[in-house]
Image (cartoon, rainbow, N blue to C red):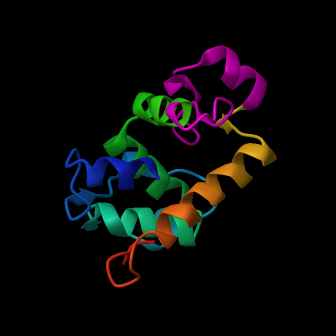
Amino acid sequence: MEAYRQASEGKIDLNATVTFKEEDKTPGSGILSTQFSPGASFTLRDAIRLMIAYSDNSATNLVVARSVLLPRRETMDKLGLSNTRLHAFVFRPQSSIAPERSKKFGLGSTTANEMIRLVEMIQTQNNSHPRSVRRDA
């Protein structure tokens, strides 16, 4: 969500190329670390798709690196979602911007109530735009 918000404000380009490197490999779910060779390049938009569709940890870190952790927190606060946080890169606890929260919650945190509210906000936004314009929704 944050990457799309920043793209809509012209802060990042979803068509920008990201390059998968050996040091980007992370354990866990996804296909990048097991099926792609270091040096593979693709768009930030495709990294977002891998993050969402395959729950790809390596792709998640590539996206987080482009859209930065702190603005995510500020966006969630503006939306009234103060419990929804991403604290660090996946499998990179030393990158935490909230060490105390990371000790308690790990990578990130949210509540069921905030997730429902966020989905409702996204649905309201989607309903206000014609489908032909919302290709990435």
Say whether residue 79 is left or right of residue 109: left
- Seen from the viewer's position, the closer of residues 72 and 78 is 78
Q: Residue at x 23, y 49 (%)?
A: 12
Residue 55 occupies quadrant? bottom right
Kindly give the residue lying farthest to the bottom in the view shown: 132
Residue 11 occupies quadrant? top left
Q: Which residues are magenta?
A: 78-105
**37 drawn magenta:** no
Quadrant the C terminus occupies? bottom left
Percent position of residue 13, x then y = 21, 56
Q: Residue at x 28, y 54 (%)?
A: 8
Percent position of residue 77, x then y = 55, 29
Percent position of residue 56, x then y = 54, 62
Residue 30 visible in the current orientation: no
**94 drawn magenta:** yes
Does residue 108 sit above or below 122 in this rendering?
A: above
Percent position of residue 36, x then y = 40, 70
The total of numbered circles placed on residues is: 0
Say whether residue 104 is left or right of residue 25: right
Does residue 67 sit above or below 129 in this rendering?
A: above
Q: Residue at x 26, y 58 (%)?
A: 19
- Seen from the viewer's position, the closer of residues 94 and 113 is 113
Residue 133 visible in the current orientation: yes
Q: Residue at x 31, y 47 (%)?
A: 6
Kindly give the residue lying farthest to the top in the view shown: 100
